[in-house]
């Protein structure tokens, strides 16, 4: 794969390789300080058994839904970087090409839980998702300040690291695919609280607003929310609990009935010793 935004070159010659589109690069951790990324925190607190399975396996394991999410994220990153560099959004054709190529690479480089047929079906809907993004979401993201910029913030004696999808003069936006979101879920999002803390570390002040762009097969919804100093204080206790859980080495399954504990959303469903036992029993 040569240089270019996942196989496409956007208007004006913005030139990005897949590494620039997909991989965050954080500064080295402070010696002796516990650091956790937002992604790691999310997995650890949802299902520490998934965390253990993820750590034990050498290959990256994904679901088709995860590959779709990565593909749309790559297209969105290309679009927002083009806005920053040139003041205009990426062409729709470049968004589609970027999403398709990112999906293919994600599937090629990972262990995919679903069958080849299901992977092909996933690929077939990428153009639809990218066109929805280009027509519904992109026009609403203006005055971009940062795009998936790796940021680290000290919260007490813990470092939290993350890469907000997009930061603009209006606030912080996070793009989601898969299970549709709602207002309550956005309001309670731990991730948006962490992103606001990272915004303070990067810009010296909280963001004005946070929002979720929920992109799904039937369309798009945006949910706005705000974070307060009290939200920031509460997240410190969450981080302490995650630190204790990780250091304990205890691997607990997701709470029974959790929507994400399913073959559609968990990449370790087929190899999970808990769910695997239920399926065989």
Image (cartoon, grey):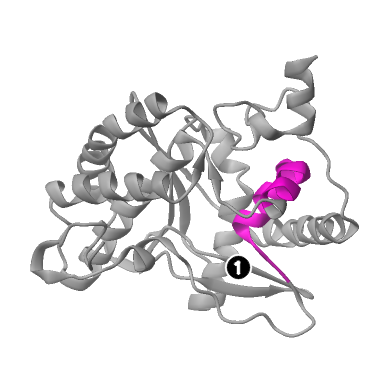
Q: Is residue 72 visible?
A: no
Q: Position of residue 56 (x, y in %)?
A: 72, 52
Quarter holding residue 50: top right
Q: Position of residue 44 (x, y in %)?
A: 73, 50
Please give the name of the residue rendered at 42% of the width and 57% of the height, measured from the top-left corner: 165
Which residue occupies the foreground of this view, 110 or 44?
110
Farthest residue, direction top: 281
What is the span of residues highlighted in magenta in the rendered image?
Answer: 35-54
Please tell me whether residue 130 is drawn above or below residue 154 in the rendered image: above
The residue that label 1 is drawn on is 161
Residue 124, image quadrant: top left
Q: Position of residue 142 (x, y in %)?
A: 26, 59
Q: Main secondary structure of the magenta part?
A: helix
Q: Position of residue 191 (x, y in %)?
A: 59, 52
Q: Secondary structure at mark 1?
A: strand
Query: Going 56% across and 53% down the picture, which residue do you hit?
Result: 192
Within 10 Å of disc 1 (Cα), the crowding (few <14, some 14-19, many 20+) is many
- Total tally of numbered discs in the picture: 1
Q: Quadrant of the C terminus?
A: top right
């Amino acid at each position: 794969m040569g240089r270019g935004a996942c196989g496409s070159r956007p208007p004006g010659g913005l030139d990005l390789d897949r590494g620039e589109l997909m991989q965050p690069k954080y500064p080295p951790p402070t010696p002796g300080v516990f650091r956790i990324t937002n992604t790691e925190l999310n997995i650890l607190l949802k299902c520490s058994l998934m965390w253990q399975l993820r750590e034990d396996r050498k290959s990256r394991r994904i679901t088709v839904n995860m590959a779709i999410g990565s593909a749309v994220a790559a297209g969105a990153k290309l679009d927002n970087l083009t806005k920053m560099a040139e003041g205009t959004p990426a062409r729709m054709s470049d968004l589609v090409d970027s999403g398709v190529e990112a999906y293919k690479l994600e599937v090629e480089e990972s262990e995919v839980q679903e069958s080849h047929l299901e992977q092909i079906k996933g690929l077939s809907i990428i153009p639809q998702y990218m066109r929805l993004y280009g027509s519904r979401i992109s026009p609403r993201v203006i005055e971009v300040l940062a795009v998936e910029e790796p940021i680290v913030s000290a919260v007490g004696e813990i470092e939290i690291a993350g890469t907000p999808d997009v930061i603009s003069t209006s606030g912080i936006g996070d793009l989601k695919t898969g299970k549709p979101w709602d207002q309550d879920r956005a309001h309670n999002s731990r991730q948006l609280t962490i992103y606001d803390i990272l915004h303070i570390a990067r810009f010296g002040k909280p963001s004005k607003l946070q929002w979720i762009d929920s992109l799904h097969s039937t369309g798009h919804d945006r949910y706005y929310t705000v974070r307060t100093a009290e939200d920031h204080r509460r997240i410190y206790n969450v981080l302490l609990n995650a630190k204790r859980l990780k250091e304990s080495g205890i691997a607990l399954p997701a709470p029974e009935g959790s929507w994400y504990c399913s073959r559609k959303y968990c990449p370790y469903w087929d190899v999970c010793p808990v769910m695997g036992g239920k399926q065989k029993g």
